[in-house]
Each structure stands twice: as structure tokens, then as C-alpha cells.
Image (cartoon, coloured by chain):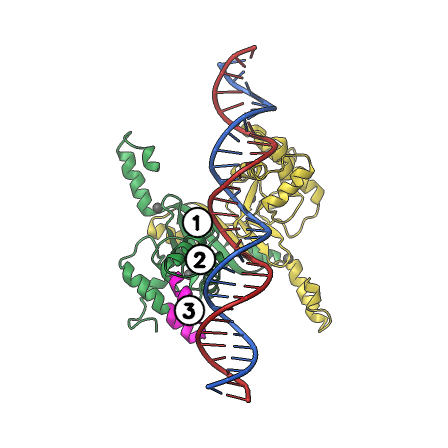
Chain colours: A yellow, B green, C blue, D red
Amino acid sequence: MTSGSPMKLDAVTKPVGFACDDHASCVVDGLSAAEARCASNGLRFTPVRRKVLEILLQEHRALGAYVILDRLRDEGFGSQPPVAYRALDFLVRNGLAHKIERLNAFIACAHPGENHAPAFMICRLCDSVAEAQSAPAQGALGAAARATGFKIERTVVEAEGVCPSCSDTAASEATDSGSATSEARG
Amino acid sequence: MTSGSPMKLDAVTKPVGFACDDHASCVVDGLSAAEARCASNGLRFTPVRRKVLEILLQEHRALGAYVILDRLRDEGFGSQPPVAYRALDFLVRNGLAHKIERLNAFIACAHPGENHAPAFMICRLCDSVAEAQSAPAQGALGAAARATGFKIERTVVEAEGVCPSCSDTAASEATDSGSATSEARG
DNA sequence: GTCCTCCATGTGATCTTATAACGTTTCAAA
DNA sequence: TTTGAAACGTTATAAGATCACATGGAGGAC
Ligand SMILES: [Zn+2]
Ligand SMILES: [Zn+2]
Ligand SMILES: [Zn+2]
Ligand SMILES: [Zn+2]
């Protein structure tokens, strides 16, 4: 519905971010999905908002508000913080982007249109971020909430660790025993 | 160990924070547990660090670094941000406190000594915070991580919602049909 | 004991992240 | 066309966090 082509089902469940077969279409699809979504909900998908989402979609990692602001300035938009923050607020409110609390940064939603409880995997080496689904209310946290009478409305789930690509790099560096263990860290 | 009495087992699993039978002992116990823990690990539990933990234990909610700093100043400690941040860093590194990413604030650990993956329930009305245990790697997130080859090292799990006490208040307000629905929101 | 080193503390300055406040513009409904 | 709500742009400022450097005390080497 969000676009002409039916979204592949596993795009919904598969964590997205560490691998991307077709990045160009990933941006285009994301933008048109957002456009459709806004149209059908009576939301104004203005140029700034569109540009911010485009900027986010072009990366597979979270961007700080001020990085986004820099790019907005380069594109001729306003150059003061509220410009970026307001657009980001719109995107987050409407499920088109997420804030990564751990990084104080923002990322395009990888499952737009779905009503989802996002979870993120953040690589501490390359800063890439992948979005997965979570169901925290069904585990230990949910049990604790029920036990105490706490009403969960929203959850932040962020895992920090090492992504497969960095993991491979580390492994192959270890194999180059002694060669460049420290300098390749940059 | 932390005191003469063996720590009750359910203190480990029970979420702590929304109710507290004996707050005074809660502070004292927390401090002596920390003291013992530092002693046995060769860590220096200095006056600033002790005071910061005491400040945190006195609250059942998360405090921002600058609030803590204000109190430190009142107590005659240094008054510049690094004083608070360094003490907080020590406490967090050693499992005596946690940072609540959602609030950019800090809270005393409710399960010190245990090797745990904390999860938090944050009341958006009264800002109280309860700590529970989580096992995010065992749910959907863990499955996603295994599927993609992501190595989880640490998790942030924070649920935002309404605590039982605020929930009761809201309910009883609703019963006062029409009286003060909007002003009590404060 | 003395010296020396490490670690913690205190301070000023600076940087990053986020919001308040206010006037102007845009847009769509009436 | 009028009009009111929402969005935009800008200035200023708040809130959160770190850098850099000097001082001071607890231990270990001697
Ligand atoms: Zn999402
Ligand atoms: Zn990586
Ligand atoms: Zn804890
Ligand atoms: Zn509450």
C-alpha cells in the first residue's frame, strides 16, 4: 500500500542496516513510502522534512542533529538548530525516523508503515546501526511491569556491540599476527 | 558481606523503585554494600564518590549530572562539571549506578553486586524510575543479532509509561468526572 | 623516614546537544 | 478573499558533556 510494489514480507522482520543490496532504491523507496504515508494521513511532507529523511536514508547509521543541519545549510535551507530539530521531531512522531538515545542521533526507520517496537544494534567500532523488531513487553521486563502495575507505553531497546563486518575485520587482523594490530584501528 | 543479614533473594529479581518499605536502610545498605564491594575490588571509594552515591540513593528517580553537582557544591565539594561526571563515571563503570539514556540522567543501582543486564521503567508523569532485570538477548533482539552475526556486548532497555501510583491518581481523577481533568496535569 | 609515581581532585574553558521565544510565511479551509 | 493553524527562519539561551592543566594525597621503592 505505501507504494506500488508490495513490500517484501521479510523486509519487515529482517533486521535492516548491516547489509543493503540496493542502496539507491532503498532511498527512493523510503522517500516514496513516506510521501504516500503522509498523503494518506493528511500530514505535510514539506521540503525540509523530505530532505532530512533523504539525508537519513542515504546513511546506514545514525546522524546527529547538527550534522543534518550542516547538510541542510548546504542545500539552502535554514541553518539554525530548530530547523533540523523540528523536521526530526516530525519524522520521529510519525514513525519515519527514530532517535538512538545512546548516541543522541537519528536514523531513518527501516520498517516504515509497520506499527512496530523498534530495537537497534549499534556497532561501537564503525557506528553502523541496524533496526530490528523487539517485543520487550513479552519478556522479563513485561513480567516486571505487570507485577508492579507499570503501564508500558513505549520502549527503548538498543544493543551495543560489534557488527559482522567489523567482527570479520578484527578476526583477519588477528590472523596477520603482529603486523598492524594497532594502526588499523585508526 | 554487605551487611549482617543475608540479602533477601527476591530483592534481586523484584523490580525496585516504585515502592520502598524502608528508605533509610535502603540508603545505608546501598552505601555499605558499595563500600564492601570497592574494598574487595581494590577500588577507592572516595568522599566525592560516596557522596554522589548517597545523593542517588536518596532518590527513587534519576538525577541529572548538574543537579548532583549542585548538591555537591552545597556539601563543599568541587563545583565544576567534571567533579560530578568523574564520580558518576566511576559508579557506572563499577556497577553501582546506571545512566538512563532516555533522560540523560543517573540512578543508583538497585541490584548492586549482581552481574545484571538492567532494564528500567520510567514514569513519564512523576519521573520515578524502577530497575528490573532484562534478558533482551533471549528474545527477538537476540534472534536478530544471531541472524546477522552481531555480537551484543551491552544493552539499553528503558520502558516509558505510567507508574502504578500515577495510574491510580489518574483513575481517581477520572472518577471526579469533569472537576479538574486539565489542571492536575500540571 | 624520603622520593617518586599514580590516581583523584579542582578549575576554567570549550564543545555538543537541545529548546525558548518571536516574527514571517505558507497553506488550506471557510 | 478572509482567516486561522501550521511551518519556517532567526536570535538567544539552556542543558549536557568533555578537554586541558595544575594541585594534592595515598602507596610503593628505596
Ligand atoms: Zn522503525
Ligand atoms: Zn561495525
Ligand atoms: Zn543495576
Ligand atoms: Zn508516576
The residue depicted at 66 percent of the width and 51 percent of the height is: A19
> Where's residue A52, x and y in %?
62, 38
Dot 2: element: loop
Q: Is residue D9 above or below residue D30?
A: above
The residue under label 2 is: B79
Nearest to viewer (mark 3 / mark 2):
2
Which mark is drawn over residue B46?
Answer: 3
> Where's residue B60, x and y in %?
35, 54
Check the residue under mark 1 and report the chain it is in. B
Q: Is residue B108 visible?
A: yes
Query: Of callouts 1 and 3, which one flags the residue occurring earlier in the amino acid sequence?
Result: 3
Query: Of callouts 2 and 1, which one flags the residue occurring earlier in the amino acid sequence?
Result: 2
The residue depicted at 57 percent of the width and 56 percent of the height is: B145
Q: Residues within 10 Å of mark 1 (few under 14, many from 20)?
A: many
Which mark is drawn over residue B159?
Answer: 1
> Where's residue B14, x and y in %?
35, 59
Q: Residues within 10 Å of mark 3 (few under 14, many from 20)?
A: few
Check the residue under mark 3 and report the chain it is in. B
Nearest to viewer (mark 2 / mark 1):
2
Quarter-wise, where is residue A29 in the image? top right
- Three-letter amino acid code at the position of disc 1: Ala
Q: Is residue A6 visible?
A: no
- Three-letter amino acid code at the position of disc 3: Thr
Ligand 3, seen in the image, is in the quarter at bottom left
Looking at the rendered structure, whether the residues under marks 3 and 2 are on a common chain is answered as yes
- The reply to whether callout 1 and callout 3 are in contact (CB within 8 Å) is no
Quarter-wise, where is residue A97 in the image? top right
- The reply to whether callout 3 and callout 2 are in contact (CB within 8 Å) is no
Dot 3: element: loop
Q: Is residue D13 above or below residue B34?
A: above
| B69 or B171, nearer to the observer | B69
Quarter-wise, where is residue B132 in the image? bottom left
